[in-house]
Amino acid sequence: MTDTQAVPASADMATEPTGDLCTRTLAMPADTPGNGDIFGGWLLSQMDIGGGVFASKIAKSRTVTVAIEAMNFRKPVYVGDLVSVHANLVKIGRTSITVHLEAWVLRRKEMQSILVTDGNFTYVAIDDQGHPQAVQHDQPPIPA
């Protein structure tokens, strides 16, 4: 198993995104319940898509989501916000990859990105039949 020193962002300390940019999309009116705030489930799905892209690059195979933990919905997302998902590797197991994901928004009239949501997602590498397989990665072990 490989661990990194990824530290979850604190809402008070984080001032800009870190990690790999995985996805970027615009929050649209269809993604709201009608009051202008974006559904939390929509944001969670955007994070899961980004994390899946990141995990699949590391595993060099298909991956599936097996766990989501420590989700922090820090600030609302509004229609018109540009949503970016950034990933940092937390841990590589035999068949699994844990990723810390952060969702940041850039609002129309603001110059600074805002951390809106973060959490840890775990993915499992799978073969063409959908069975778990060992992660084939090039990540060097982290010294103790």
Image (cartoon, rainbow, N blue to C red):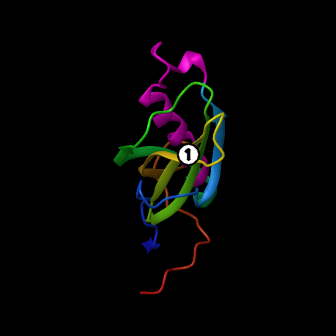
Instruction: Out of 89 and 131, give the one closest to the viewer.
Output: 89
Judged from this view, the residue extending furthest toward the front is: 109
**Which residue is drawn at the image coordinates 58% and 72% (left, top)?**
139
Residue 34, percent from left and from top:
47, 12
Magenta part of the chain: 28-54
Residue appearing at x 44%, y 66% in the figure: 91
Residue closest to the eye, 112 or 83:
112
Whether residue 40 is in magenta: the answer is yes
Whether residue 110 sits left or right of residue 41 in the image: it is right
Image position, residue 51 (x, y; %) = 54, 48
Residue 140 shows in the view? yes
The number of discs equals: 1
Residue 117 appears in which quarter of the rendering?
A: top left
Q: Nearer the viewer, residue 121 or 104?
A: 104
Task: Label the magenta part by its dominant secondary structure.
Answer: helix
Residue drawn at x 61%, y 22% as measured from the top left = 28
Q: Position of residue 137 (x, y in %)?
A: 59, 67
Mark 1, residue position: 104
Q: Is residue 125 visible?
A: no
Question: Regarding mark 1 in the picture, which secondary structure is present there?
Answer: strand
* Mark 1 neighbour class, 10 Å CA radius: few under 14, some 14 to 19, many 20 or more: many
What residue type is disc 1 on? Answer: Trp
Q: Is residue 21 left or right of residue 36?
A: right
Residue positioned 53% across, 61% down in the render: 88
Q: Is residue 58 above or below residue 77?
A: below
Relative side of 15 to 33, left or right = right
- Give the percent coordinates (x, y) of residue 104: 55, 45
